[in-house]
Image (tube, rainbow, N blue to C red):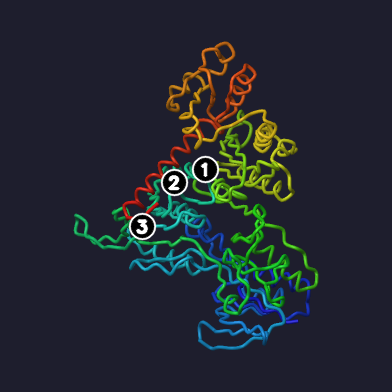
Amino acid sequence: MKIVIVGGVAGGMSAATRMRRLDESAEIVVFERGHYVSFANCGLPYYVGGVITDRAELLLQTPESLRARFRLDVRIDHEVTGIDRAGQTVSVRNTLTGEESIEGYDRLILAAGATTRSEPLDFGLATHTLRTVDDVDHIDAVLAAVDGSPSAVVIGGGFIGLEAVDNLVHRGVHVTLVQRGPQILTPLDPEMAAPVVADLRAHGVDVRLGTHVVGSDAPVDSAGTAATGLLLSDGSLVPADLVIDATGVRPDTSLAAAAGLRIGDSGGIWVDETQATSDPRIFAVGDGALKTDAVGGAGALVTMAGLANRHGRAAADTIAGRPDAAEPAVGTGIVGVFDLTVAMVGWNEQRLVAAGRAHRIVHTHPSSHAGYFPGAEQMAIKLLIDADTDAILGAQIVGGSGVDKRIDVIATAMAAGLGASALSRLELAYAPQYGSAKDAINQLGYVADNLLHGTTRSVQWHELSAELAAGASLVDVRTPAEFAAGHLPDARNLNLDELRARHAELPAGPLIVHCQVGQRGHTAARLLSQLGHDVRNLDGGYRTWLAGQAADAAVVAAAAEVLAEGIPV
C-alpha cells in the first residue's frame, strides 16, 4: 500500500510514524511545502524571547533522520497543488525549482494545517507571522539589526499574540499590543480576561483594545531623526521596528475544496469518526479538519497540537485496518503570560447565552495550595454548568501556579461525563505545598452542589445593577477595614460576625450579600435565609465584580472607537 501525506508537522508526521510502526511494508511519502518537518512550532515564540537558546532544539526531526529510523520518504520544499480523486494521484510542485510531477496513492492524508486569516499585511515595515522556523529567523534578524532598544507591534491578542508579547518583552523589546475587539483571548469571558490585561500593562505593554492598524508613517521627531511607526484607528502613532501579525488562522481547505471533498459548516474539512473524508480513500487531520465538539455535538474547529497528533495516529490506525472512533473535543487550552497562567476548556458564558442554553455559573478564588504554606498564589476560576443535567460545560482559570493541574482535572471530568457536583467527591493528592485539604476542584464541586440542591442562590456580577434597580438591597459582610479599602456603590456594611445579632437592622425585601470572593457571602446567605430573609449571594464576591467592571470599561471604550468610525454597533 502507498500512503501519501500532505503536511509534515504535527498531524502529518504523527500519521506517518504510526503508519510505519503498524506496517513495515507500506510505502509512505510525505510532502511538506516548507523547509522543515516535525519542528516544535509551539516553541517558536520562546526562541524569539531567548528562553530557548538553541535553535536546533526546535528541529525535532529531519528528512534524513526520518528516513533512517522510519524509512519515510520525506520531501521538503514540495507543495501539493491538486488532487485527482478518480486517478488517485496528486500534483506536486518543487518550490525551489518549479519542477512539477504526479504522485499516485492508495490512501491520502491531508494534514496541511491552517493558513493566516487574512492577506499578508503590508505597512512598509518588517511584518511577519509567528508560525514557522523561517518566521523566527526573520524576526531574530530584524531585532538584531536595530540600534538601541527595539519596538514592536503585535496585532492580535490570541494565544500566539500573547506568547509573542511575553517573549518580546523578555528580550527587551517595547511592545504595543493592538486588538480589534474589546478584549484579548476571546475564549475567555470578559471578567476573566480583565486580569490578564492588567498584568500586561503592569509589565509595560501598551495594550490598545478596540483598535486596529490603518497604515504606517515615517515622521521626523524633534531631533530631526526619522522614526518608523504604525498609525492606529484611535489616531495615535506607535513605534514599530517590527510588526507581528497574530490575527489568527483559518483552516487550509484549498486542496480538499478543489477536489470536491465535503467542507463542514464551520469551514473545516468534514471527517467521520475515523478521520475519513467524504472520499473514503482520503483522510484529514490537524487544524484543517473538523472535530466533534463535546459540548454542542456539531463539527467545530479546534486548533490544538494534541488533537492533531491524536488524529494523525487515528488516521493511520484506520488505514491499517484497526479503526478507533475519535473522542469529541473539549478544546482544552493554556497559555502563559508573564506572571499568569491562563487556561480554558469547553464553552464560555457568551457562547452559552448566544446558543440559548440554560446554565449555572460558579466563580471561586482559591489558593494554589494551603494558604499557610509559603508561596501560595491565588487563582480565579469560572465553572459553567448545564442547568438541567449538572454536566460541566466549560471552565476558565487565571492565576499562577496550579492552574494547569486544575484545568486538566476539569477536562478529564468532562471527558468522563462527571457532573459538576461530583467534583466535590474527587479524591485528589494533598500536601500543603501542592494543594489544600479542600482542593480548588473540590471547592468548585461544593458550590455547584449547593446550587444544584437550592442550598444557595446566586447573582452574577453583570446581573447586579438590574437586581438593585428592581429593589434589592446590597449588604457587604466583610470587615469595616475591607469595606473602607473599597466597596460597591450603595452597599451597606454589616460584618458577618455581627450579622446574627443585627440582622433586624437590614431593610425588608430581597437582599444580595457579598464578601471578597464569595465564601463568607455564602455563609451570610445561609444564615439570613434561615432567619427569614429573601437572600442571594453575589457569585465570586467583590473581586469578581471588580474584574467585571474593568471588562465593562474596555467594552465601552471599544464601542466608542467603533462609533467614531461610523460603524453601527
Looking at the image, residue 309 sits to the left or right of residue 148; the answer is right
Name the residue rendered at 63%, 35% in the picture.
Answer: 369
Outermost residue, top direction? Answer: 501
Residue depth check, mark 3 versus mark 1: number of the one nearer the observer: 1
**Residue 71 position by quadrant:** bottom right
Calculate the distance from the C-alpha at mark 1 to the C-alpha at mark 2: 14 Å
The amino acid at mark 2 is: Leu
Dot 1 alpha-carbon crowd within 10 angstroms: few under 14, some 14 to 19, many 20 or more: many
Residue depth check, mark 2 versus mark 3: number of the one nearer the observer: 2
Choose between 154 and 232: the one closer to the eye.
232
Q: Quadrant of the N terminus?
A: bottom right
Choose between 429 and 424: the one closer to the eye.
424
Q: Vertical placement of 531 versus 380: above or below?
A: above
Which sits earlier in the primary sequence, circle 3 or circle 1? 3
Calculate the distance from the C-alpha at mark 2 to the C-alpha at mark 3: 18 Å
Residue 164's disc is none
Percent x, y of residue 353? 56, 47
Residue depth check, mark 1 versus mark 2: number of the one nearer the observer: 1
Considering the numbered disc 3 on the image, is that residue within a helix, a strand or a loop? Answer: loop
Looking at the image, residue 322 sits to the left or right of residue 88; the answer is right
Outermost residue, right direction? Answer: 322
Label 3 sits on residue: 150
Name the residue rendered at 47%, 28% in the picture.
Answer: 468
Percent x, y of residue 459? 55, 33
Looking at the image, residue 250 sits to the left or right of residue 125; the answer is right
The amino acid at mark 1 is: Met
Considering the numbered disc 1 on the image, is that residue within a helix, a strand or a loop? Answer: helix
Calculate the distance from the C-alpha at mark 3 to the C-alpha at mark 1: 31 Å
Residue 200's disc is 2
Label 1 sits on residue: 192
Percent x, y of residue 254? 55, 75
The amino acid at mark 3 is: Pro
